[in-house]
């Protein structure tokens, strides 16, 4: 495993949390605490993505007569279109 050195800045809250993890003995130092917590966050995101993809596959495998209508396409996208229009006016 290679190691990349990087200087980072923390909010007071994030720094305090990392320091508490080290002081509690969960990690030997700040670098390990940051790396370890990032690894945990990545694992959680990967798990959530896997669950989402499995559910999506399950739903896509349903026969069409088991699908529930969501309404007209224009109704589904109306909120997104309004948001994009508002964003365009801000720029």
Image (tube, grey):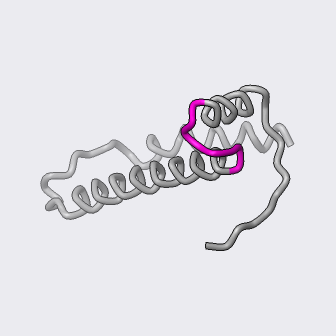
* Quadrant of the snapshot with the C terminus: top right
The range drawn in magenta is: 24-31
- Residue 31's place in the image compared with 10, above or below, is below
Residue at 65 percent across and 38 percent down: it is 83
* Quadrant of the snapshot with the N terminus: bottom right
Q: Going by the image, does 42 lie left or right of 54? A: right
Q: Position of residue 37 (x, y in %)?
A: 58, 45
Residue found at the far bottom of this picture? 2
Residue at 75 percent across and 66 percent down: it is 4
Q: Where is residue 67 in the image (x, y as percent from the top left)?
A: 20, 51
Q: Going by the image, does 73 lie left or right of 91? A: left
Q: Is residue 50 magenta?
A: no
Residue at 75 percent across and 40 percent down: it is 87
Residue 50, quarter of picture: bottom left
Q: Where is residue 90 in the image (x, y as percent from the top left)?
A: 83, 37
Q: Position of residue 59 (x, y in %)?
A: 24, 56
Out of 27 and 71, give the one closest to the viewer: 27
Out of 63 and 43, give the one closest to the viewer: 43
Residue at 57 percent across and 36 percent down: it is 25
Q: Does the magenta stretch include residue 26?
A: yes
Out of 17 and 66, give the one closest to the viewer: 17
Most common SS among magenta residues: loop
- Residue 74's place in the image compared with 59, above or below, is above
- Residue 22's place in the image compared with 29, above or below, is above
Q: Going by the image, does 55 lie left or right of 12? A: left
Number of numbered discs on residues:
0
């Amino acid at each position: 495993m290679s190691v990349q050195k990087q200087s980072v800045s923390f909010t007071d809250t994030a720094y305090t949390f990392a320091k508490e993890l080290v002081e509690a003995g969960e990690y030997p130092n700040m670098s390990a605490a940051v790396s370890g917590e990032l690894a945990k966050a990545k694992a959680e995101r990967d798990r959530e993505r896997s669950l989402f993809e499995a559910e999506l596959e399950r739903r896509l495998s349903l026969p069409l007569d088991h699908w529930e209508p969501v309404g007209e396409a224009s109704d589904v996208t109306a909120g997104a279109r309004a948001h994009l229009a508002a964003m365009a006016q801000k720029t």
